[in-house]
Amino acid sequence: MPDATHSPILVWFRKDLRLDDNGALLSAVEKGRPLLCVYVREPEDEAVGPLGAAQAWWLHHSLQALSATLQACGNRLILKTGKASEVLAALAEETGAKAVYLNRLYERDGIDAEILKSLYDGGLEVKRFKGQLLHDPHTMRSGTGGPYRVYTPFWKALEKDGEPREPLEAPETLPAPGTFPSSETLCDWHLLPMHPNWAEEFETLWTPGEAGAVEKLEQFVARPIHTYKADRDFPALTEATSHLSPHLAFGEISPARIWYATRGLPASDHVTHFRKELVWREFCHHLLAAFPKLRTHNWNDRFDAFPWEENDDGFQAWTKGMTGYPIVDAGMRELWRHGIMHNRVRMITASFLIKDMMVDWRRGEAWFRDTLLDADVASNAANWQWVAGSGADASPFFRVFNPILQGEKFDADGDYIKRFVPELSRLPKKYIHRPFEAPPEVLQKAGVTLGKTYPKPVVNHFEARDRALAAYAEVTGKSAVSDPRD
């Protein structure tokens, strides 16, 4: 058995499926010892919530891409299933490895503490590195000494702190052991949908893996970032945003690499606005680190008494994109077909579920977690609570998005609606966001029969808004009026 100075190092890949700017991998390479690169498929109770079906599709292809990259560097990826502490300990015993290197995932700190203690108690050297975030949530504190709860001071603190660190370059070669332990087969994990293959359109839109992430970043900084602030709210402009969020969710690219790519660009409000979006992700992770129950509990416990309704029929109509409100339905159908939803439309659909239908935000969060390719435990929970008004620095509950006006403002010509709700594509612009107001002759000419070819509204928005505001007033003792311009 090799001694500690020549023994292999286990590099435990998780949400860092890349070689570039990978602190654990690069530090292991610097030791000059053989590397055993391993990905562990853990039981759900060992991870942070179940892996969504859409993300299972992405994970399959991302691991496939990582495996190919490792082979090109002279190494390979070992796949194992089981409790991480047991799998890694068994691999160490089998191979003579004396160390485990990994990158920190702050949302897993409580889970990881037990795993790493078990490995350490078993005689293994354990080293954990940063890289998921630009700044450590446990060292960044507000003026009162606690975690930041409001975004603007958080952003200003990061600005004052100066530029984030430069990313680390990927190694060209990875030292390998003479023999590798056995590995499970990715196909045997059955991560891909089969009958039916509801992800068939994913492959035409996405290229999971580190190379796909780099390509998206290069495309974005070459052109769309220069009009980002002006164009980002319009869902029909499909190339106006970066499309980096799924790659970030799987760690195929680091936030430091993305930030670094914007450094040489001409200073503008567009670049700053994009950076602020990157920092919003950071803020969500800092919130989760401060409040680990963010996904399941209201940050503001005043909302614990809110009178949510079951409304199963309404919830099902929402998930299928059959609410009778075109912008909502377009968003939900985009989500199902493409595994993604435009950010502006995410806010509209979330507001509709929570405030028009009075459905608990946690049901929406769970649906997004299962269907979004970019589902991120921190961002998903924080953003749902932001819309619900129950989170930190949240939008007030009484801001109720009007799905008609939102559609007319951000999809004025109805191009987004026509793409995802094609049964309305022949309606004139005047009625495409409000088909329920169209005269019978207009509906007939467009081939639309409300209640048959397209649903009637599941709720009256204005009545639903008043009901939501009344419930809010009852819980908080504060009367509120929503802005009709929303």
Image (spheres, rainbow, N blue to C red):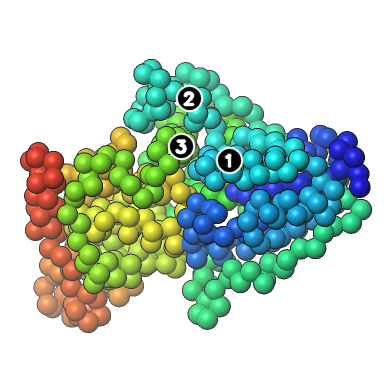
Residue type at tag 2: Met
Q: Callout 3: few (<14), some (14-19), or many (20+) C-alpha neighbours within 10 Å?
A: many
456 to the left or right of 247? left
Element under label 2? loop
Q: Give how far apart the Cα atoms at labels 3 and 1 are.
A: 14 Å
For residue 355, which quarter of the picture? bottom left
291 to the left or right of 85? left
Tell me, for residue 289, which label it has, or none. 3
Element under label 3? helix
The residue shown at (89%, 56%) is 179
Element under label 1? helix
The residue shown at (9%, 46%) is 474
Residue type at tag 3: Ala
53 to the left or right of 127? left
- From the viewer's side, name the closer residue of 232 and 392: 392
According to the picture, the residue beneath numbered tag 1 turns out to be 113
Q: Callout 2: few (<14), some (14-19), or many (20+) C-alpha neighbours within 10 Å?
A: some
In the figure, 443 relative to 273: above or below?
A: below
| x, y percent for residue 126 | 71, 38
- From the viewer's side, name the closer residue of 68 and 269: 68
Q: Callout 1: few (<14), some (14-19), or many (20+) C-alpha neighbours within 10 Å?
A: few
Can you tell which of label 2 and label 1 is closer to the viewer? 1
287 to the left or right of 242? left
According to the picture, the residue beneath numbered tag 2 turns out to be 140
Q: Give how far apart the Cα atoms at labels 3 and 2 are.
A: 11 Å
Tell me, for residue 35, which label it has, or none. none
In the figure, 15 relative to 358: above or below?
A: above
Residue type at tag 1: Ala
